[in-house]
Amino acid sequence: MPFFSIVIPTYNRAHLIQHALNAILKQDFADYEVIVVDDGSTDNTKTIVTGYSDSRINYIHQENGERGKARNTGTKNAKGTYIFFLDSDDLIAPTYLSVAAKHLTELNQPEFFHIRYQEIFPDGTICPTRTLNKDTIQQTINRQNQFACQFFLRKDVALQFPFCENRALKIGEDWDIILKVAQRYPLHFTNEVLGSIVHHGNRSMEVASSSVVLTSKNVLLERLGADTQIPKAVLKNVSVEFTFLAALSAAIERKRALAIGLWWKAFLQRPGIIFKRRTFAILKRIIGG
């Protein structure tokens, strides 16, 4: 039984997934398996993945059902003690798994663990994400997802909290899981930056329309609202965050009135957004048109 099962959902990313797999194969910790769940790709993803001779890399094909269903398929087929969720366009440093194993062992195999990441933009700019504070992590994650979908769940916890398979939830399915776990278990992490989120034109967060963001907000609020462990304040935070994000999407779509209306709605609930970079990005889009 491997210590880690790395679950990678993918759809038509044959040109990217080999970078993720190559990064995994460079790990200095060998006790893992990789489960690539091909969510109905129409490109040569299968050829790329099955072309690897390493027996730790497993390929599963399913009819297209979105990332949530693909991740659940991976979890159900996993043999590891921990499930590590990684997107097919993201990267990890060679020491990523060994650092995780060290912390998980020292923490006596907790339910949740996360390693910080940097963001790599198309122009080559690299931006590390914010440093987290263990004393305020609960409040932080209740306001905004700081873990993306790069985190470890002990397998029993991953099975307890499966991803949403509603296709209408296009973004935020990872925050859904994290919020539910956060109300029940400690959120352990290290601020070592060993992961990378690679931005590109087809990344789901970057192509989501304002209507997709607002629909996802409604689905997520319905799911979280059905969980009695989720405080009402968290529901408010989720609503504000998605409204704020939808405002940016509307600005990118050049729907100025909608962008202004959504931003104002978010501002009334959380005035502090006026100082956020996203606000300046919205203003730039609206004014520059």
Image (tube, helix red, strand yellow):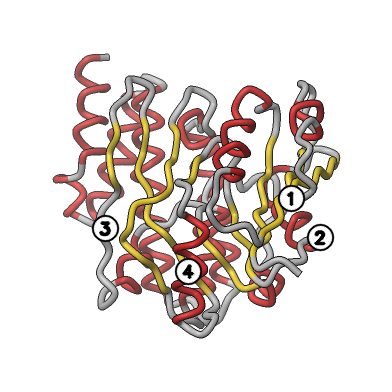
Q: Nearer the viewer, residue 228 or 23?
A: 23
Q: Amino acid at mark 1?
A: Ile
Nearest to viewer (mark 3 / mark 1): 1
- Dot 3 or dot 4, earlier in sequence: 4
* 227 with respect to 249 (left or right): right
Q: Amino acid at mark 2?
A: Asn
* Res 75 quadrant in image: bottom right
Which image quarter holds the N terminus? bottom right
Cα–Cα gap, marks 2 and 1: 8 Å
Report the disc number at residue 77: 2
| Separation (CA) of disc 3 from disc 1 | 42 Å
Q: Badges 3 and 2: C-beta atoms under 8 Å apart?
A: no
Who is closer to the viewer here, 92 or 126?
92
* Badge nearest the viewer, 3 or 4: 4
Labels 4 and 1 touching (C-beta < 8 A):
no
Q: Which mark is residue 269?
A: 3
| In the depicted structure, whether residue 2 falls above or below residue 126 | below
Q: Which mark is residue 113?
A: 4
The Cα atoms of the two marked residues, 4 and 1, are separated by: 19 Å
Q: Earlier in the sequence, mark 2 or mark 1?
A: 1
Please say if the residues under marks 2 and 1 sit with CB atoms less than 8 Å apart.
yes
Mark 3 vs 1, N-terminal side = 1
The percent coordinates of residue 201 (x first, y second) are: 48, 22
Q: Position of residue 262 (x, y in %)?
A: 34, 41
Q: Residue at x 55, y 80 (%)?
A: 109
Q: Residue at x 68, y 25 (%)?
A: 14
Q: Is residue 289 above or below residue 283?
A: above
Name the residue that disc number 1 marks.
35
Tag 3 and tag 1, C-beta contact below 8 Å: no
Q: How crowded is the residue under tag 4: few (<14 C-alpha within 10 Å), some, or many (20+)?
A: many
* Mark 3 neighbour density, 10 Å: few (under 14) some (14–19) many (20 or more): few
| Residue drawn at x 55%, y 64% as measured from the top left | 152
